[in-house]
Amino acid sequence: MRQYYLQVFSKLAGFTGLPAQIAKVAFMAIIDALLITMFFAALHKHAGSLELVIAAVLLITNFVYFAKFTLPFKFLIPGLLLLVVFVVVPVAYTIQMSVFNYKTGNEVTKQEAIVQLVRNGLAPDSAGTTYDMVLGKVEGKYAALLTNQTDQSVTLVNTDKVFPVSDSSITRDSYKIARTAPGFTPLTEAEVVAADSIISGLKFPITKTTFAQPQSADVAGLLTQSISYDAGKDQVSDLSTGEIYKDNGNGNFADPKHPDRILQPGWKSFSGIHNYTALLSDPEVRGPFIGIFIWTTLFAFLSVALMFAIGLLLAITLNRKIALRRFYRSVLILPYAIPSFMSILVWKGIFNTQYGAFNALFHTNIDFYNNTWLARGIIILVNLWLGFPYFYLISSGALQSIPSELEEAAALDGANPSQVLRRIKLPLIFQILSPLLIASFAFNFNNFNIIYLLTNGGPAPIGKVAGSTDILITYTYKTAFGSNIQNLGLACAISVVIFAVVGSVSIWGLRRSKVLDVI
């Protein structure tokens, strides 16, 4: 088999010249076509940062594979690009979003928010005035010849202004609806159908605060404009009350005298470190965050410590020659072999209050999932069940990798088995497994599945997002998607904190273990 692979690699190494150049150009043409398609798709969606990333990938890839002096990078570039696209870019985007006020009600741009505010400020007038309408054009702009359905008075207006019109100058039909007026050119039926999408968005100003808006092709309603925007002063006025709302610098127009009174919708705005300071200063956020942070750290530490202790104990026990050792080893890895989500759901059923096996077996009625410490204990127990086989396997491998000569030399020096274990094997095992312990701590710090599937973060107070068994990652998910107010900016800030904690612990652990030191 080895000889076969050597022959294959030799043939590939000899694939040079014009055929190889044609193959390379064809391959890069396919890659370029794919990237260009993705670029224009992102451009069409106005996904600014994504457009830049795709353009950079396109340029770098072509430069590396067509330049003659970039041979080493031809092997590194696929991995580097995947690292940048799937790790660096998401992390950078998360950090970027963490400094924005980006939540329900603050999701659009400022201009879009202003348009919605003005549109929401339109309401039918108190009398419920409606008009029979004939659409046409005046002075080259869309216009409406309006007949009041109550008193049959006539108004001629285009999208800019009202035109004076006398009753003697208009023509009415048998229903007393005005059909023609001087300077007014009616639209044909075909023209009305063709311009349907435009007509539905028209507003004809009757006064400074009222507008006639088409309800159908021949009926319009009188709407009162209660909200207006002054672009020069960058402020919004409530025309019905006279109140002024100004940009509060945090994505909303607010009453300067009463900052808590804001208009919705707002817009996504830069907030600096506000989301981070809110974690420690805002009472609504600080309490849940600190409690969840402590529980997350405790959960990750206890999980790793217990799984490692039990896995190592079993590995030491089964490293000796005992009866049925192979059978025991096979049984111990079963929890690790079964998909974790299935095991979690089985355990969830076992501790169910109404029909769970535990309560049925012991004739009790314990509500495990509505008691904070019982729920936390179940989480640690189930996590231990899922994780100890992994630590048993890696501890067994670490024990078997220790040279037998060390044990023999220690025995010759008079060391008993207990001393050999404490002073030789355990330090070596810790040295070998320290990167895996750190990785396991990071995994359990972000162990979303067990919390979400087993307790869903509960028990939780009514109306609160955070539950007693939530860890930071599930709290982040609930902050972003688990309530009526989806605070994506705050969720990104919590994600950055998680990244910083896990990264710091990992770097510290690796430096202490010296596994990255060059020998």
Image (tube, grey):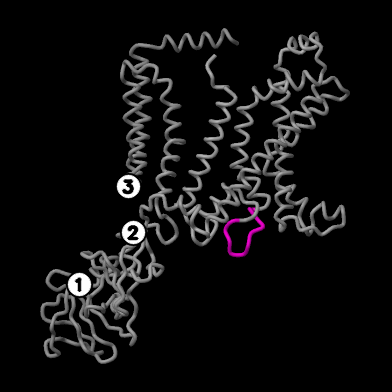
Task: List x then y, in percent, for residue 19.
Answer: 36, 15
Q: Toward which corner of the image does residue 110 lie, by quadrant?
A: bottom left
Foreground residue among 336 and 304: 304
Residue under label 3: 44
Task: List x then y, in percent, for residue 80.
Answer: 43, 27
Q: Toward which corner of the image does residue 150 lie, by quadrant?
A: bottom left
Q: Is residue 188 highlighted in magenta?
A: no
Q: In the image, which residues are magenta?
A: 456-466
For residue 30, above or below residue 278: above
Cβ atoms at labels 2 and 1 below 8 Å apart: no
Distance, label 2 to label 1, CA atoms, is: 34 Å
Q: Which residue type does callout 2 highlight?
A: Gly
For residue 157, above or below residue 270: below
Query: In the image, 324: left or right of 3?
Result: right
Circle 3: element type: helix
Residue under label 1: 159
Residue under label 2: 249
Q: Which residue type does callout 1 highlight?
A: Thr
Circle 2: element type: loop
Which mark, residue 403? none
Q: Which residue type does callout 3 highlight?
A: His
Point out the residue furthest to the bottom here.
151
- The residue at 74%/52% (across/down) is 374
- The residue at 26%/92% (across/down) is 151
Task: List x then y, in percent, for residue 465.
Answer: 57, 58
- The residue at 34%/80% (across/down) is 124
Q: Which image quarter holds the N terminus?
A: top right
Distance, label 3 to label 2, CA atoms, is: 30 Å
Query: Closer to the camera: disc 3 or disc 2?
Result: 2
Query: Closer to the camera: disc 2 or disc 1?
Result: 2
Along the polypeptide, which appears first: circle 3 or circle 2? 3
- The residue at 16%/79% (across/down) is 162
